Image (cartoon, grey):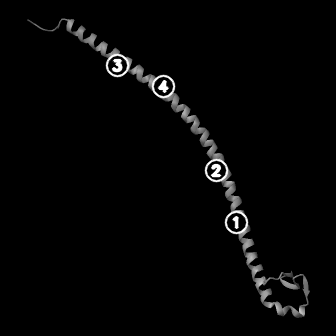
Amino acid sequence: MDDKVYRLELANGKMTELYVDGVKIPAADWDKYSDAIAAIREQIRKNKIQAARNEEQAKLNAIQEKKNEEQAVRNEEQARLNELQVKKNQVQEERNEEQVKLNQVQAARNKEQAKKNQLQAEKKPRSGRRK
């Protein structure tokens, strides 16, 4: 501050020593540096507040990191399940395609059988008619 290096020594918040540019200032002369001392004390107060905020944020960050790790595990498990489902879907798709083919074959047989039934019905004499 002011191109000078200040060092305050504090005990229980009370200043016990003051150094300016490495020179110890007698307690009787501290009032000459009252503006600098006040500014330093204010900065110390702000630093303590910021340190408390940083500590709280670090706790929150640790909690979030734990949650992120847990989510990553869940995501990995879901990805594994998704891969399994993709494989199951592929197998089911193959089965469905095979079933379509079987259904087409059966439809052709049914059509052929219907023709045979029609021909058979036409060949049978109609009973129950009286002359």
Q: Residues within 10 Å of mark 4 (few under 14, many from 20)?
A: few
Q: Which disc is residue 107 wearing? A: 3
Question: What amino acid is at disc 4?
Answer: Arg
Q: Earlier in the sequence, mark 2 or mark 4?
A: 2
User: Dots 3 and 2: beta carbons under 8 Å?
Assistant: no
Q: Which disc is residue 95 wearing? A: 4
Which residue is under mark 2?
A: 71
Q: Is residue 63 above or below residue 39?
A: above
Label 2, label 4: how far apart the Cα atoms are:
35 Å
Residue plotted at (20% across, 9% down): 122
Q: Earlier in the sequence, mark 1 or mark 2?
A: 1
Query: In screen coordinates, is 46 left or right of 71?
Result: right
Q: Earlier in the sequence, mark 4 or mark 1?
A: 1
Q: Position of residue 67 (x, y in %)?
A: 66, 54
Residue plotted at (45% across, 26% down): 96
Instruction: Determine which quarter of the picture holds residue 58.
Output: bottom right
Between marks 4 and 1 in the image, the one whose residue lies nearer the viewer: 1
Q: Residues within 10 Å of mark 1 (few under 14, many from 20)?
A: few
Between marks 1 and 3 in the image, the one whose residue lies nearer the viewer: 1
Which residue is under mark 1?
A: 57
